[in-house]
Image: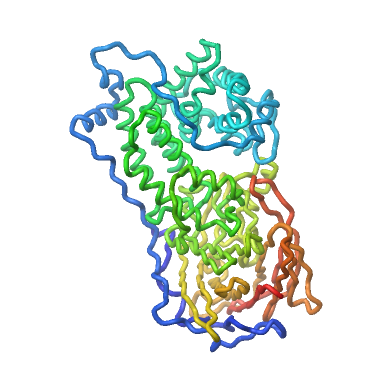
Amino acid sequence: MSDAVLSTRPAHGGAVSGDGPAIPLGASDEGGLVNDAQSVQASPGEVVEPGRALALADFAPPSVGAGERLLRLAYRLGIPGSALASPFRKPAKPRLLATVTNPLPGSKMAGTALRAGHFLVHGAKSPIAQIDFAGAARLSPPLERVVHSFAWLTDLEASAPRETVAPVAERIIGAWLNANPKPPARPGKGPGWTVGNAGQRELNWLVHAPLILSGPDKVLRARILTTLGDTARWLDKNVGRGEDLLEQVSGWCGIVAAGLLLPEGKPRRLFGEAGLIRALGELVGDDGGVLSRGPLQQIEAISLLVRLRACYQAVRRDPPQALETMLGLLVPPLLALTHGDGSLGSWQGGWAVDAGDLGLLIEASGVRTRPLRDVRQWGYQRVVAQKGVLQFDAAPPPLAKHTRSGCASTLAFEFSHAGQRLVVNCGGAGCAGGLMPVRLERDLRATAAHSTLVLDDTNSTAILINGKIGNGVSEVEVDRRTLSGDKGSGATRLEASHNGYAGRYGLTHRRILILRDDGTELRGEDLLVPAGRKGKNGKVGFAIRFHLGPGVEVRLSEDGQGAGLALPDGSYWQFRVGGEGQLAIEESIWAEGQGRPQPIQQLVISGLVSRGGGNFAWLLKKMG
């Protein structure tokens, strides 16, 4: 993991920066920022335990007897399950052994659109009649995933009684089967036959079997059952060829579900459980965060395990303890990226997933826990100060092999108060292709789409095509402390630095954030420190961006060194800048709870900075 290091060393000693003006608590709001390092001190013994480098969770296959180990080995070697499960009988006819109760309700609105003849994905309608189910005419990535994974079955089921929606499901699945008569030899022959989509489709067909197998068409029913068996065998052979670890987990979940619900499936189940637990151990770090660092992938992993657990419940079998343990690990880091209203922050291509949708997933998981505040391995810091919630990306971007929509967001933050978002990231790269235009996908992954500092209008980590990322930030140093101030006031202080601009510009970006314990004041300082012993000559352009939450009205102050922020809840906040740099208001964009674009504004501190270094202090405070 040397390509992505989270250092345990503090960025430098002391409670405040030694390389530029400090940002104390209790400074006056008039006359700019006060630089008095004596007003805040680090309390002895209150340094939060440093994080460790990213480490893979270690999960062993479930303990089984010698006979079951032999079955698993024989199945892995290619002996058919029917020959192992009942060697002296004819292979069983295709059928389902149990009916699964769907644990995750879908979107009634999207289901209603299906009944009206459209797929509705992130606000964009696509006529079903115009969909090329064979995949020759490529669809947008979000629509492609929904169509070929059959995730839409959940929405259709939520929209009306089964007898009303079953004919719609049968028409669509019939069209898909006509376009995909048999699996290809290997993945990659069309989007329907990626390991991820095939695994999701197998699981969705089994979970929603009453919806697609209850009609009068016996021929269609037989085709569906045959395809379930064919897909399971295809996954057996190709699950290791998934494009990333999450795709492989999807494939393994499909294998295990087929082993549970199709006849003579015990060898397949044993084979699938061992592979699934091994893949989960490689996917998830030891604090429960997936290695893609994306909340969307975290949600997908939880959803897969919740639906797979429902398959176990259908056949009255307990899932392996490792699966329950994994659910318990996955939920707390995801909750760490929620704001006060329960919705998600916008990180690593994700969007502000609605609190209702997220709440249903957490409820279905059965995990009752609190958010982690210091998710070092996953790379996020969370500070809760009464009604204030601060989220901070204090880690390198994910490795290219782990990510689908990796973002150059190191040292970006989001801040909300009483459920109202003041500072956000644009988000939405993962839903580009709905109402969010595909052409914006790379821009939404850029450093400038996040609330952090940008040098020379370049990304701190290179953004490549096809969801990949390149060179840039490879090491982040992070330090978290609890501070005590005058008259019993306190705060949490986060300090982190990254080396993403060191190679090109010889400068290290260091950011300090101090949030008061009452949640009404956030002070920040962005420092550019020479990476070598001697600073380089010349100057380089910089911009510190603060994308403002939806509905925030902003107006610059008369002196040009501040701005007033009026929030939808009627509260008023002041933003002040100390030192160099010009403050301006620019347009921006934000992906809301369903992945649809919303116009917002951003505050930008910009100017030229010496390659010998510089520092820029700022203040965000609630007034009244």
Compared to residue 292, the image places residue 196 above or below, namely: above
Q: Residue 541, relative to residue 208: is it above or below?
A: below
Where the N terminus falls, by quadrant? bottom left
* Left or right relative to 72: residue 485: right
622 lies above or below 461: below
- Report the side of 302 relative to 87 (left or right): right
Q: Is residue 419 among what the camera can see?
A: yes
Q: Tell which of 70 and 179 is nearer to you.
A: 70
Is residue 507 in view from this perspective?
no
How is the structure coloured here?
Answer: rainbow
Residue at the extreme right of the image, as rendered? 558
Q: Quadrant of residue 305?
A: top left
Q: Which residue does the image show at 66% across and 70% down from the upper left?
A: 542
In the rendered image, the residue lying farthest to the left is 66
- Image coordinates of residue 4 in percent, x first then y, are 44, 59
Using the image as rendered, state which of residue 349 and residue 313 is in the foreground: 313
Quadrant including the C terminus: bottom right
Task: Pick the residue in front: 372 or 469.
Answer: 372
Toward which corner of the image does residue 512 lie, by quadrant?
Answer: bottom right
Residue 192 in the image: state x and y as whole percent: 53, 29
Task: From the top left corner, tell me how far across and down residue 314 is, in percent.
Answer: 40, 29
Res 426 → quadrant: bottom right
Total labels drawn: 0
Seen at 46% across and 32% down, the residue is 199
Image coordinates of residue 228 in percent, x first then y, are 45, 22
Residue at left 70%, top 75%?
623
